[in-house]
């Protein structure tokens, strides 16, 4: 299965006061994590959105098909925009692609312009 698109049905948020994590020789300075979950073809999928503090080492998005989980890394300054999207849109879709595991998309449903 190359591409999976699922609707996020639940999410939770974690804020970290001291969120420095050392991972594969990289220091991640995490301020908050939003985890979105949903299902596709009776399988559970999960996307963790890491909101990074200034000075954090950059990382590419990564999808692990065997675990059906993905991670993306955004600046903390983008968290309010992201949370507005979650709260104000009726459908948030997440797209994973096993042919390109660094390509993760978060999109809203198409809506009419008023």
Image (cartoon, helix red, strand yellow):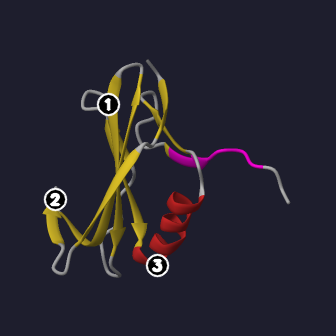
Residue 95 visible here: yes
The residue at which mark 1 appears reads as 44
Is 93 in front, or is 11? 11
The residue at which mark 3 appears reads as 77
The residue at which mark 2 appears reads as 23
Position of residue 89 measured from the top left corner of the image (x, y, whole percent): 60, 55
Q: CA distance from mark 3 to mark 2?
A: 23 Å
Q: Residue at x 46, y 78 (%)?
A: 77
Query: Which range of residues does the magenta coloring cover?
Result: 105-111
Asked whether the residues under the numbered discs 1 and 2 touch, taking CB atoms below 8 Å apart as contact, a structural biologist would say no
Mark sitting earlier along the chain (3/2): 2
Magenta stretch containing residue 12, yes or no? no
SS for callout 3: helix
Up the image or down, 48 lies above or below 58; here it is: above
Would residue 16 appear left or right of 93 to someone viewing this image?
Answer: left
Judged from this view, the residue extending furthest toward the right is 114
Q: Residues within 10 Å of mark 1 (few under 14, many from 20)?
A: few
Position of residue 32 measured from the top left corner of the image (x, y, whole percent): 30, 70
**Quadrant, the C terminus:** bottom right
SS for callout 2: strand
């Amino acid at each position: 299965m190359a591409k999976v698109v699922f609707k996020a049905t639940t999410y939770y948020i974690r804020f970290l006061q001291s969120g420095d994590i050392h991972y594969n020789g990289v220091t991640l300075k995490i301020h908050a994590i939003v985890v979105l979950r949903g299902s596709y073809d009776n399988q559970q999928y999960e996307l963790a959105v890491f909101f990074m503090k200034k000075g954090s080492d950059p990382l590419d998005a990564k999808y692990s098909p065997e675990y059906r989980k993905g991670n993306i890394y955004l600046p903390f300054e983008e968290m309010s925009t992201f949370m507005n999207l979650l709260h104000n849109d009726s459908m948030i879709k997440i797209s994973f692609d096993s042919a390109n595991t660094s390509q993760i998309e978060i999109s809203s449903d198409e809506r009419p312009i008023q």
